[in-house]
Image (spheres, rainbow, N blue to C red):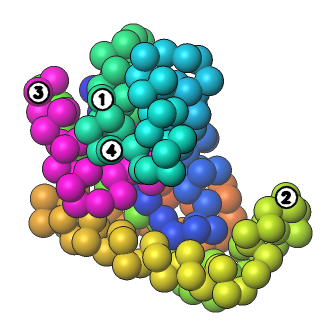
Amino acid sequence: MLNLLIFGPPGSGKGTQSVRLAEKFNLIHLSTGDMLRAEIASGTELGKRMSAIMAKGELVPDEVVIEMIASKIDSAKGFSGFLYDGFPRTVEQAVALEKMLGRRGMKIDSMLVLEVDHDELVKRLILRAEQSGRPDDKNPAVIENRIDVYKEKTEPIINYFKKKGVYQPVNGVGAIDDIFMRLSEKIEIFFK
């Protein structure tokens, strides 16, 4: 099964594109935040463990997140693969994800990174705040911090996957359909 990572700074459009790509290529869209909330809401054993951890104000440990992803992979039937949206967030998570996939005879096939210049990101986030009422996108200081945190945390992961030869930059500027087409071209090679 195909395993694709999609990355991009806040406002790059990776959430919008992920949903469309998953549908087009019959992939399971894995957003760890959504998965955590679903596990907790469904009251599974894993969800109860995570809820107890989060109730103490702690972060869910990497091994628990990897276990959650492994469970999703093991139960998936009839899909072409997986699209990881904004995960892994650290090199340690990347290594753990690769080990877990390796035990299943799988690997990371590609890391698609939407590249959008700083001014465009700020413009998009402010527009998103106006359209969807997301208060975190209204404050310029918060926007700058989110972009800085992304760069600081994500650069090591990008460098890690560059060394593995799976990093693929994608121009994330332009019409949504044009960006979708560019991403699709990078994925279509796996289906030929």
Q: Distance between the residues labelled 1 and 2?
A: 33 Å
Mark 2 or mark 1, which is nearer the start of the sequence? 1
In the image, what residue occupies the spot 45% across and 72% down? 150
Q: What residue type is labelled 1?
A: Glu
Q: Mark 1 points at which residue?
A: 67
Q: What residue type is labelled 3?
A: Arg
Q: In this view, does 178 lie above or below 150?
A: above
Q: Give the range drawn in magenta.
A: 83-104
Q: Name the residue under label 2.
A: 132
Residue 22 falls inside the magenta stretch: no
In the image, what residue occupies the spot 65% across and 79% down? 143
> In front of the other: label 2 or label 4?
4
Q: In which quarter of the image is residue 99?
A: top left
Q: Is residue 57 left or right of residue 63?
A: right
Q: Is residue 117 above or below residue 70?
A: below
Secondary element under disc 4, as helix, strand or loop, is loop
Secondary element under disc 1, as helix, strand or loop, is helix
Mark 4 or mark 3, which is nearer the start of the sequence? 4
Q: Name the residue under label 4.
A: 61
Q: Is residue 184 left or right of residue 135?
A: left
Q: Nearer the viewer, residue 28 or 39?
A: 39
Residue 95 falls inside the magenta stretch: yes
Q: How far apart are marks 3 and 2 (CA)?
A: 41 Å
Secondary element under disc 2, as helix, strand or loop, is helix
* Residue 168, position as x, y percentages in the image: 32, 62
> Which mark, by number, is residue 103?
3
Q: Check disc 4: other Cα within 10 Å, few if <14, some if 14-19, many if 20+.
A: few
